[in-house]
Amino acid sequence: MPRPNRRLGERRPVQSSELQWNVPKQTALSRFKKQQPEVGLLQDVSVTGAGVVAPISDQIQRGSKVAVAFGWVQGSVRVMRVEPHPDGVRAVYGVEWESTDSELARAILHNFLQSDLPPY
């Protein structure tokens, strides 16, 4: 029987924090053009991923890998779900860390869930 909530870690709402959201390039030619990152807002965080509100992009679908930067830390996430945002111009992307031990995941978790994490 399918489980309606398969989440491993509880999502915790966080104060909106910006991150750079680098939409995958559209065509082979666009790979040579410098692309400005979009601004994404962290909405919630868990040990395995986060909810990010960012502009709608046809280039981002379930399974897409997106490069992101949080402060000075860079990494990538895998998009697991895409839902429309009430404003109609953005979407809510449910993402998973590429690795829960990545520098990006550790920086975000340290920033938002530090008191909830077990000691090393």
Image: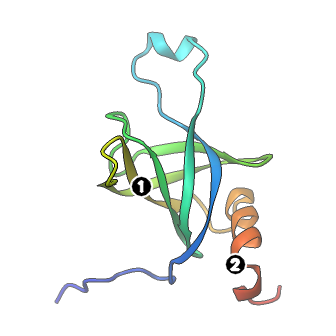
Q: Which residue is mark 2?
A: 113
The residue lying at 47 percent from left, 52 percent from top is: 53
| Residue on which disc 1 sits | 93
What is the crowding at mark 2: few (fewer than 14 residues within 10 Å), some, or many (at least 20)? some
Image position, residue 55 (x, y; %): 43, 40
- Callout 1: SS: strand
Residue at figure coordinates x 37%, y 51% from the top left: 63
Residue type highlighted by circle 1: Tyr
Give the Cα distance between marks 1 and 2.
20 Å
Residue 65: x %, y % from top left? 48, 45
Sequence-wise first label, 1 or 2: 1
**Residue 46 vertical position relative to residue 34 in the rendered view, above or below:** below
Q: Residues within 10 Å of mark 1 (few under 14, many from 20)?
A: many
The residue closer to the viewer here, 7 or 88, is 88
Residue that appears at 56% across and 11% down: 32
Quarter of the image that includes the C terminus? bottom right
Task: Look at the image and tell me in which quarter the N terminus lies.
Answer: bottom left
**Nearer to the camera, 60 or 85:** 85
Question: In the rendered view, does 51 fall on the left or right side of 63?
Answer: right
Above or below, 101 against 19 in this view is: below
Which amino acid does the dot numbered 2 rest on?
Leu
Which residue occupies the extreme left position in the image? Answer: 1
- Asked if residue 111 lies left or right of residue 8, the reply is right
Give x and y (percent) for residue 115.
Answer: 76, 86
Q: Give the answer, above or below, for where 110 lies relative to 2.
A: above
Left or right: residue 1 compared with residue 100: left
- Residue at the spot x=32%, y=83% of the render? 5
